């Protein structure tokens, strides 16, 4: 059984992050500050790239960065205490 976004967030949550499931991204742009740089991430970087496209299509004007390689790369290369799944 594949992990859901809620499961992923519970397993490997980075500090100071918020969960916005991909299907809710366009409708939740008001919860993001366009004046702040926003780093978007998922397990491998694929869904987060889709989320960035959806945010831009919804008119979000803030700076958006995709965490290259996602949470899996973060765990391998930056913080091995973050669980991989």
Image (cartoon, helix red, strand yellow):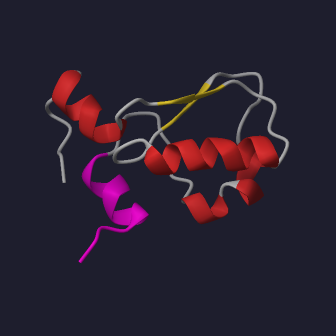
Residue at image location 20% in from the left, 38% down from the top: 82
Can residue 18 be seen here? no
Image coords of residue 3 (percent x, y): 30, 67
Image coords of residue 12 (percent x, y): 28, 47
Which residue is situated farthest in the right direction here? 59
- Tell me how many marks there are: 0
Q: Does the magenta stretch include residue 11?
A: yes
Compared to residue 82, the image places residue 11 above or below, namely below
Residue at image location 66% in from the left, 55% down from the top: 25
Image coords of residue 61 (percent x, y): 81, 31
Image coords of residue 8 (percent x, y): 33, 57
Front residue (pair 49, 16): 49
Can residue 37 be seen here? yes
Front residue (pair 84, 19): 84
Name the image quarter holding the C terminus. bottom left
Compared to residue 68, the image places residue 71 above or below, namely below
Which residue is situated farthest in the bottom direction here? 1
Name the image quarter holding the N terminus. bottom left
Q: Is residue 2 magenta?
A: yes
Residue at image location 75% in from the left, 27% down from the top: 62
Front residue (pair 36, 69): 69
Compared to residue 6, the image places residue 65 above or below, namely above
Image position of 5 (left or right of 26): left
Magenta stretch, residue numbers: 1-12
- Res. 2 image quadrant: bottom left
Image position of 69 (left or right of 38): left
Residue at image location 67% in from the left, 44% down from the top: 53
- Res. 60 image quadrant: top right
């Amino acid at each position: 059984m594949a992990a859901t976004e809620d499961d992923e967030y519970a397993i490997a949550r980075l500090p100071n992050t918020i969960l916005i499931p991909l299907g809710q991204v366009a409708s939740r742009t008001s919860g993001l500050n366009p004046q702040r740089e926003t780093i978007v991430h998922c397990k491998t970087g694929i869904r987060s790239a889709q989320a960035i496209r959806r945010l831009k299509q919804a008119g979000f004007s803030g700076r958006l960065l995709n965490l290259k390689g996602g949470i899996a790369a973060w765990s391998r290369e930056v913080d091995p205490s973050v669980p991989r799944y």
